[in-house]
């Protein structure tokens, strides 16, 4: 059923919302501030949820975050391959 729905969605008009063209769940419809010097991984629309707090990452968390950013950033992909 899911495969058929996905296939048929290619033939729907552009205003019909499908799994292929739905907005991300964090997109609240506001403007996305785009800074030219920011990596593409940080240009996704989002909004705050809940209360905020600050904490420092330990060494293992920092290395994991750095690895995630580097592996998921379009600008780095040519250097990996």
Image (spheres, helix red, strand yellow):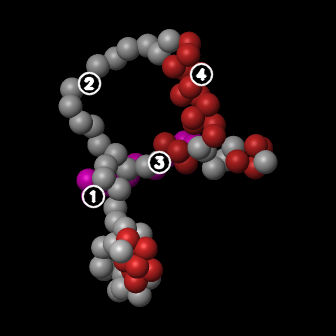
Instruction: Say if residue 21 shows up in the picture.
Output: no
**Residue 66 placement: quadrant:** top right
Residue wearing tag 2? 52
For the residues labelled 2 and 3, say whether their Cβ atoms are less than 8 Å apart: no
Name the disc covering residue 43, or none.
Answer: 3
Name the residue at 49% across, 42% down. Answer: 42
Q: Give me the C-alpha separation between circle 3 and circle 4.
A: 21 Å
Name the disc covering residue 49, or none.
Answer: none
Q: Give me the C-alpha separation between circle 4 and circle 2.
A: 23 Å
User: How many neighbours does mark 2 have within 10 angstroms: few (below 14), some (14-19), or many (20 or more)?
Assistant: few
Residue 48 in percent (x, y) is at: 27, 37
Name the residue at 63% across, 37% down. Answer: 70
Seen from the viewer's position, the closer of residues 34 and 43 is 43
For the residues labelled 4 and 2, say whether their Cβ atoms are less than 8 Å apart: no
Between disc 1 and disc 2, whose residue precedes? Answer: 1
Between disc 4 and disc 1, whose residue precedes? Answer: 1
Instruction: Say if residue 31 shows up in the picture.
Output: yes
Name the residue at 34% across, 17% down. Answer: 54
User: How many neighbours does mark 4 have within 10 angstroms: few (below 14), some (14-19), or many (20 or more)?
Assistant: few
- The secondary structure type at the circle numbered 4 is helix
Q: Is residue 69 above or below residue 63?
A: below
Residue wearing tag 1? 29
């Amino acid at each position: 059923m899911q495969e058929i729905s996905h296939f048929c969605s290619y033939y729907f008009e552009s205003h019909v919302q499908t799994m292929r063209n739905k907005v991300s769940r964090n997109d609240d419809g506001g403007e996305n501030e785009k800074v030219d010097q920011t990596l593409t991984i940080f240009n996704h629309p989002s909004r705050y949820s809940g209360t905020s707090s600050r904490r420092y990452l330990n060494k293992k968390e920092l290395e994991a975050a750095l690895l995630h950013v580097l592996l998921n950033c379009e600008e780095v992909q040519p250097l990996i391959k």
